[in-house]
Amino acid sequence: MDTLYISSHPDDFRSLLPLIAAEFCPSPPRIIHEDPPAEVARSRPALVLARSGGTVLTGANAVSWYLAAADNRTGSDKKQESQVWQWLSFAENELMPVACAVTFPLSKAELLRVLKALDETLVPRTFLVGEGVTLADIAVAVAALLPFKYVNRKSLVNVTRWYNTCVNQPQFLKVLGKISLCEKMVPVTPKPSAAVNLPYCIVANCLLQQKKAKLEKKELDVITYNIPTPPGEKKDVLSPLPDSYSPQYVEAAWYSWWEKQGFFKPEYGRKNVSEPNPRGVFMMCIPPPNVTGSLHLGHALTNAIQDCLTRWHRMRGETTLWNPGCDHAGIATQVVVEKKLMRERKMTRHDLGRGNFIQEVWKWKNEKGDRIYHQLKKLVLKTQTCFGMHFNETIQKLSYAVQEAFIRMHEEGVIYRSKRLVNWSCTLNSAISDIEVDKKELAGRTLLPVPGYKEKVEFGVLVSFSYKVEGSDEEVVVATTRIETMLGDTAVAVHPNDSRYQHLKGKMVVHPFCDRKMPIVLDDFVDMNFGTGAVKITPAHDHNDYEVGERHKLPFINILDENGLLINVPPPFLGMKRFEARKAVLQALTDLGQFKEVKDNTMVVPVCSRSKDIVEPLLKPQWYVDCREMGKQAADVVRNGELKIIPDHHLKTWFNWMDNIRDWCISRQLWWGHRIPAYFVTVNDPSVKPGEDVDGHYWVSGRSEEEAREKAAKRFNVTADKISLRQDEDVLDTWFSSGIFPFSIFGWPTESEDLRVFYPGTLLETGHDILFFWVARMVMMGLKLTGKLPFKEVYLHAVVRDAHGRKMSKSLGNVIDPLDVITGISLEGLHAQLTDSNLDPPEIEKARQGQKSDYPSGIPECGTDALRFALCAYTSQGRDINLDVNRILGYRHFCNKLWNAVKFAMRTLGEGFVPWEKLCGSESVSDRWILSRLSAAVALCDSGFQAYDFPAITTAIYNFWLYELCDVYLVMNSHICQADICRQTLYTCLEVGLRLLSPLMPFVTEELFQRLPRRLAQDSTSSICVTLYPETSEFCWHSEDIDRQMEFVMSVVKTIRSLRADYNLTKTRADCYLQCIDSDTAALVQTYSLQIQTLSYSQAIYPVVGGDSTIPQGCGVAIASDKCTVHLMLKGLIDLEKEVTKLTAKKGELEKQMEKMKEKMAKNDYKEKVPVKVQEGDAEKLRQNETELQKVNEAIENFRKMM
């Protein structure tokens, strides 16, 4: 085991960084809180690598990098590794120095500057690099520990969100404990001895104190819309806008008006859906969510993306249909209702009977199931619901389509009857699909709870025992993780090339508990190097053994019934529960002397996701779909480009599944679902031999019992009165009915206008986790039953996890209802939802603790628009999304910024403003710049929608509104925007900017759009949702020259602002001299001098060409770029002696740091022992210190000249 020597001080950056990194390490080192032996290392932290001959790593960065890399926390590729290394440098060289001196006024200003830069970086991100915690987050969070524990940071919304996310990770909590963030800084007088023997960064602690008071939170504004508006009537837009954005006000009344106006109908603006549309047709169907009561944020992500795409296509003028549906969710629904029955009435479904139980399910569905549609409407999902599965007549239509699909495929022989191994849940008494099997990984012996057992059951062990070879004293030792299955063994297998067993070829072994003699078979599947090289074969209870049994024609002995009780076994095991038999078999083998050993074994245990029971492979007669030909077709259409899968890294998975596809078991032993329209035939005629259940010849399918009887009579050549029928009790797998969804919703197999216009569809958008279970089956069944692909493209978004990267799970308390994010909910309200759920009491308590940890104050009201925007901003084309509710709140603040910007702009436009039909072409340089940025945003949004790059869309819109229009254009033109040309430019930015945003934020954009005048008098567009989306062909004002010029201007402005912050010139205006490298640069400065003066809050701007002699004495200096140096006049504005004193102290500290670094780098073994990356970091740090020291010396000299 590696050993880490570390300081025990709670705030030592150099110790905390490797300690937290060690918590992420799969094999954490041993921690020793003392100095390492002198022969090992001279300083802490030091990491001694046991597996590398005692190699020693020293220094926080080197040690942390090594530990974090073990868990891939240093970046997934070279680019990310470089980014992580840059953040390490930032933490140590920029953040740490100012964080450790937070009590000094100059340092506080510098700290705020650094944190604000970090805050801007984190606007579109949850973590600093990639989609999870990396060493970058660990280093920067630890560096910021002091200011966040002791200093007010209210204004840093994004940094605070990110910081809370980091420090609440389990690994952080284990090292740091629960961090209480400071709300107000109170300086105190330190004791003289406070800093003795402490790291430098701890000295600041003596000057700080946490105020012990409850955190005061500013309540978000809640404004309601109180003007009486009948449902379907247009909302009042003549009253003044409220002072601030409030979701409750903005979201009121619009949805019913949109519906009544018919904006969501595909035929909107046309006579009917069949009328040709030169812009094309767009059709997409919703992946049907389960009808089990409620959507979570994962569903919200899917539907937000789809609604944005639908709105974008509609605004492009296409005939657009987005069709909703709801999956009947056979197993999930039945489990929910069965639990409800037992909890409320102490009854099972068998107590009720099938008919009454189905009525109970429908009753529950009618009470709870419609919540899904309410949630969809709250998310502003503009679906065309006339085909929705929640209408009774449509349910009948869809049921008929499912029945028809089964019958056609059965008659063709594609669906057939067979007895094979299935995933069996003894608790559910049903086969389940692979997606309903959770694979629980065990590192060794583990006790797991199993339904129906009072005590936990042992798993994760390998039991070895022997079989006696018939007619000799020899024995063959085998091993198993499921010792009870040996009761069903029918052979022992060895590898044909294993010399140890060649002499046993053709021999038999004897079962110890019965007279069964079992052959020793030779099979290539055996791994000679695992265990003894001999394997017990249980063909009826193991998938690999099943295939061995088929190859060698072994007996298949089923030892389990549907309830998990032992059958076909000798006493005393007969009738035992399977895991009670596990103990009994082990004891019996021990008594016979044939037990050998038990040892820990790494293994995967299959667990039913619905019942939490251990899944058993069980031989059952079931219905199967022959997928060989359909799978080949599904692979071919992707290979030849007919079907496109985005992103393409899923192609490997697709081809792997399709090229190696197995037949699909579609039987489910449930009562809720589409009952299989197949009938077992009994012929009441002695000339016809009675059939068996597994014989497909004795099964017929039919649309009715009469039709099935006629088919059977014809098949067996008897009269119909001699036929007795028994309909299969089973129902079809949910994925079977979902597989025909794209065409069953349009009335298939009946020809209809809707089927003709909207099938095949355009796009299928869903999560990558159901690529095989749903997407592949739709493709296969679409091709099989209609001869057409159901869609042309498949876009797969990432899977949503919580802020800590955990899978959404009700038992963890991290499954969040989108409505709770939209409207807000207290912690007590979240707890109450758990009480009403189907969770068991221990799971409820665990979930309560999870909610209390993640949402101590509940969830604030974020609104629909903020939720939709956040979900789209998160949608990277990766595999997982760690969704932080705090980031959604950040986008509500964006809505407020948008609201205030439009209100301000509308006041600027003034009453009676009339937009020109087009801009005049005589715009100022500021106008041309913002129009260039607007054109760039239009292009980015267009390409983003085309490529399904939603983060690119949200970033483009966010940056345009916030950082370009609000922070720059409105500020620098605030004093001249009364000019007509400027106001026309401003109107164009508002109107186009709202249209760009409309697909993502439909409510707030509609509310603000309705207040704007129309550009053309004849423009009768009544809603922004049916206004044309901006296209690049229309907005061609992008100018790289102007963008480049403005980029230079902003670098100058930021440099001036930074200098002002350094010297605490918060309200005082100062003259600014811009020393330019040439006359062209000076001319550029002169052109933008008014903008620079306004944005930098300067007294005056003076462009200067020449040496320092042309600059007045008494200026602070900073380099803006290689073409311009900023000189800010400070003389008479600051206390020069005080500044020199502080800079002198800073100089001394820098010289100490450089001396230490040079000593470290001069050591004889430095080049050999220190990793190259650490050496590069050290060299960079030394270079930065040298540069900073040079600047400090220049500043001291400059100040002394002023004195």
Image (spheres, grey):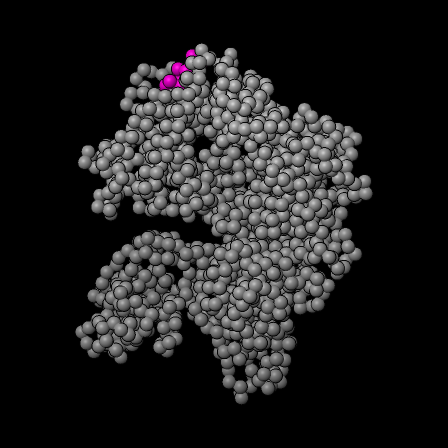
Q: Residue at 57% across / 69% down in the picture?
A: 676
The N terminus is located in which quarter?
Answer: top left
Q: What stretch of residues is rendered in magenta?
A: 1136-1145
Number of numbered markers: 0
**Which secondary structure is most common in the magenta stretch?**
helix
Residue 466 locus on image (x, y percent): 24, 68
The C terminus is located in which quarter?
Answer: top left
Position of residue 75 in the picture relative to residue 601 (left or right) = right
Vertically, is 293 above or below 777? above
Q: Residue at 18% across / 36% down in the picture?
A: 39
Please tell me which residue lies in front, 243 or 822: 243
Vertically, is 929 above or below 273? above
Note whether residue 61 is visible: yes
What is the quadrant of residue 1053 in the picture? Answer: top right
Vertically, is 430 above or below 1002? below
Vertically, is 534 above or below 328? below
Residue 560 locus on image (x, y percent): 39, 67
Q: Residue at 65% across / 32% down in the picture?
A: 926
Assess whether residue 1138 is covered by the magenta stretch. Answer: yes
Q: For the view shown, which residue lies furthest in the bottom direction?
A: 687
What is the quadrant of residue 1184 in the picture? Answer: top left
Please tell me which residue lies in front, 211 or 683: 211
Q: For the view shown, which residue lies furthest in the right direction?
A: 1018
